[in-house]
Amino acid sequence: MAAGSGLLLRALGLAVLLLPVVPRGPPGAAERRCFCQVTGHLDDCTCDVETIDAFNNYKLFPRLNELLQSDYFRYYKVNLKKPCPFWNDNSHCGIRDCAVKPCPSDEVPDGIRSGSYKYSEEANNLAEECEEAKRLGAVDGSLSKETQQAVLQWTRHDDSSDSFCEADDIYSPDAEYVDLLLNPERYTGYKGPDAWKIWNSIYEENCFKPQNVKRPLTSGRGDDGGHMFYKWLKGVCVEKRAFYKLISGLHASINIHLSARYLLQDTWSEKKWGPNVTEFQQRFDEVITRGEGPRRLKNLYFLYLIELRALSKVLPFFERPGFQLYTGNKSHDAEMKNLLLEILHLAKSFPLHFNENSFFAGNKKEAVKLKEEFRLHFKNISKIMDCVGCFKCRLWGKLQTQGLGTALKILFSENLIEKIPESGPSYGFQLTRQEIVALFNAFGRISTSVRELENFKNILRNMR
Ligand SMILES: *[C@@H]1O[C@H](CO)[C@@H](O)[C@H](O)[C@H]1NC(C)=O
Ligand SMILES: *[C@@H]1O[C@H](CO)[C@@H](O)[C@H](O)[C@H]1NC(C)=O
Ligand SMILES: *[C@@H]1O[C@H](CO)[C@@H](O)[C@H](O)[C@H]1NC(C)=O
């Protein structure tokens, strides 16, 4: 184990961050160290965290959760077989392939397998890691006959439109429907250098950041504790700052899920998933992450508010009598549409949104340019998702990027949506079923994260 994890740590360059040296302190200290900044007002927004918690955990989350169990929202079409367009995936044990077919030990490079004693131990670790990732990362693709029928009909109900993500994806013969309820987002064993590479290229090349500005906690020289980075971030326009914060929020949300659905016990008779506080602290504790953790959590709330705002703005599109959540069961469809509208009205009733004049609403020419820039950056991020080695992570990564992309599309189309006629075609603004499913499921993940935080808060509060 030691050799294997040493290798991982070196490759990550994050040894400091990963060592679980959690200093002990007076009661409540552990809680404060993750949540110290996550209270009161949020930047760029007139709202506070406590109000969001209460609104989400007791009002919105339960309803959204019910909606996402329905047939319309549980099936998502995705192409998981697209090759990574940016680099050759030469990850050490080919985790990428491991997730669909067994990973025979001869896939472990010879040099590692037949080396000295130290290396063969390493190879064993790699093979084990590989096995684990294969088992936990695989996607369960079983669909019932009825679903396959319904799915055929959905295709005919879809409209096309300009999208923020790679839309050609779903027309590929490789694209398949997956049941999201059968494939929950949780710990998969996919971490270390491969996962880090994905996030790194998202942050480094797709967040408007000049290369000479180092992100906090990147390894090597030039680490000034994020001083230069935050100075740069403060200077850019509110939308570009938002872009970085959204990505950071998404990253935080995914890490909260992995910590909240950690594989705690794994025997042949039973698998137990639950919260792992150590894992959570390694990602969010102020001391361990040198101040980054609480910022990440703040960005999660920011992401929450952006998606909430998108939902409140898109209400006119869903409110039209002609819109259906079509599955073929009339009474059920109507029931679900009511629930959907109830959620959207709830989103609209939330009082603390952004200052209307400061966000996505500069002068018209600027706004068009910005929209295009956002779209290109976003398209690229959705392509990077094809480089995610673990299939289950890839599935949720793609879905959440498409969901956030759809939210941005809505925010950039505010004027068009306001003009949608009550009946007839909604010129200029459309959402496909895929986009709708992604939008609500992505928001569902963020909403779940906010709720998980309450649980971690309680655990940490009672820790010494
Ligand atoms: C897209 O992402 C890749 C990989 O990170 C990068 O090499 C490329 O420059 C990016 N392109 C744009 C337009 O951002
Ligand atoms: C919790 O996560 C840490 C790593 O972050 C791991 O070392 C530990 O074994 C996990 N605990 C359990 C009970 O799985
Ligand atoms: C249609 O939905 C209703 C309400 O959800 C349910 O009671 C009924 O069994 C469904 N009918 C069919 C044919 O599935």
Image (cartoon, rainbow, N blue to C red):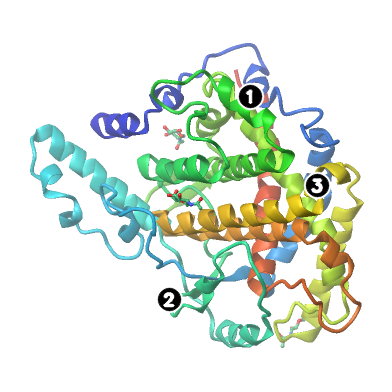
Q: Position of residue 261 (x, y in %)?
A: 54, 46
The answer to whether one can see residue 124 in this image is yes
- SS of the residue under disc 2: loop
Mark 3: few, some, or many residues within 10 Å (few <14, many ≥20)? Answer: few
Q: Which mark is residue 174?
A: 2
Badge 2: residue crowd in 10 Å (few <14, some 14–19, many ≥20): few
**Res. 86 mark:** none
The residue singled out by tag 3 in the image is 362
Q: Quadrant of residue 331?
A: bottom right
Quadrant containing the N terminus is top left
- Ligand 3: quadrant of the figure: bottom right
- Residue 459 visible in this rendered orientation of the protein: no
Q: Between marks 1 and 2, how big is the CA–CA gap?
A: 45 Å
Residue 278: give x, y in percent of width and height. Answer: 51, 30
Which label was assigned to residue 231?
Answer: 1
Residue drawn at x 58%, y 42% as measured from the top left? 208
Pick whichever of labels 3 and 1 is earlier in the sequence: 1
**What residue is rendered at 47% in x and 21% in y?**
223
Residue 162 percent across, percent down from the top left: 65, 69
Q: Nearer the viewer, residue 361 or 216?
A: 361
Viewer-nearest of discs 1 and 2: 1
